[in-house]
Image (cartoon, rainbow, N blue to C red):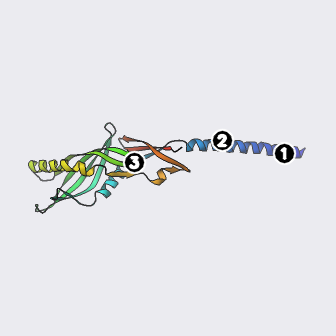
Amino acid sequence: MNRISVKKILIVLFAFLLAGSAALFVTGCATMGEERTVNVTGDQIAKKLNEKLALPFSLLKVFDVNLSNSLVTFDKTTGRMTTTMDTTLNSQLLDKSLAGKLGISGKLRFDAATSTVVLDDPKVENFNIAGADGKYNNLLNAMAKAVGGEMLNGLTLYTVKPEELKFGGTQYQPKNMIVTDNGLQLTFSPQR
């Protein structure tokens, strides 16, 4: 009789283990099939902007422009990002370096082929040099607006990391990108 009781207990334990394993498997499959969300902050975008624009570039072969200290904000209503950057202008035409602020806005687009977020349709909103009179600032604004958007179009602002596309043995692919007031929300769905 003790033998039968032990046998019944072992069968019941095995049944519980089997049921528990099945439940874990089903739960694991359900979580593997769910979408993943990655949030990208303004600070992450600002860091990338600072890296990309750290090297001076030439504006109309007259001015050497240095950009730094990006301050990035997002507008979920328009889907645009705006950034203000410290700007330094140098030129052989000037006695000294000029400092000011550059304001840029642009739409953000996810490029699935390269798994990157890029700046699309950028616009130079304003370009102000400290201490410059209105006419000089207007001239610099006109030059910056004429070439700035073209120079910045397609600029990579964020690259999806390989570990964001693979989780728990499941490979994910980009599905959607939403601009929020706090940053970007990238949604990935499992590849089937």
Residue furthest to the top in view is 77
Query: Which residue, as the protein is rendered here, is positioned at the far right?
Result: 1
Residue position marked by numbered label 1 in the rendering: 7
Discs 2/1, front: 2
User: What is the C-alpha distance between the residues marked 2 and 1?
Assistant: 24 Å
Q: Return the residue at label 2.
A: 23
Q: Which one is nearer the viewer's eye here, 101 or 91?
A: 91
Residue at (29% x, 50% y) in the render? 71
Q: Earlier in the sequence, mark 2 or mark 1?
A: 1
Q: Which mark is residue 40?
A: 3
Report the disc number at residue 127: none
Left or right: residue 102 compared with residue 190: left
Local crowd at mark 3 within 10 Å, few (<14), some, or many (≥20)? some
* Whether label 2 touches label 1, CB < 8 Å: no
Element class at badge 1: helix
Relative to 133, 122 lies left or right: right
Tell me the quadrant of the picture where the C terminus can be found.
Answer: top right
Residue 101, percent from left and from top: 21, 51
Q: Give the CA distance from mark 2 to mark 3.
A: 34 Å
Q: Position of residue 145 (x, y in %)?
A: 19, 47
Q: Amino acid at mark 2?
A: Ala
- Circles 3 and 1, Cβ within 8 Å, touching? The answer is no
At 24% from the left and 48% from the top, the residue drawn is: 149
Q: Nearer the viewer, residue 144 or 127?
A: 144
Q: Residues within 10 Å of mark 2 (few under 14, many from 20)?
A: few
Which of the two discs, 2 and 3, labels the residue nearer the N terminus?
2
Disc 3 to disc 1, C-alpha distance: 57 Å
Q: Is residue 159 above or below residue 23?
A: below
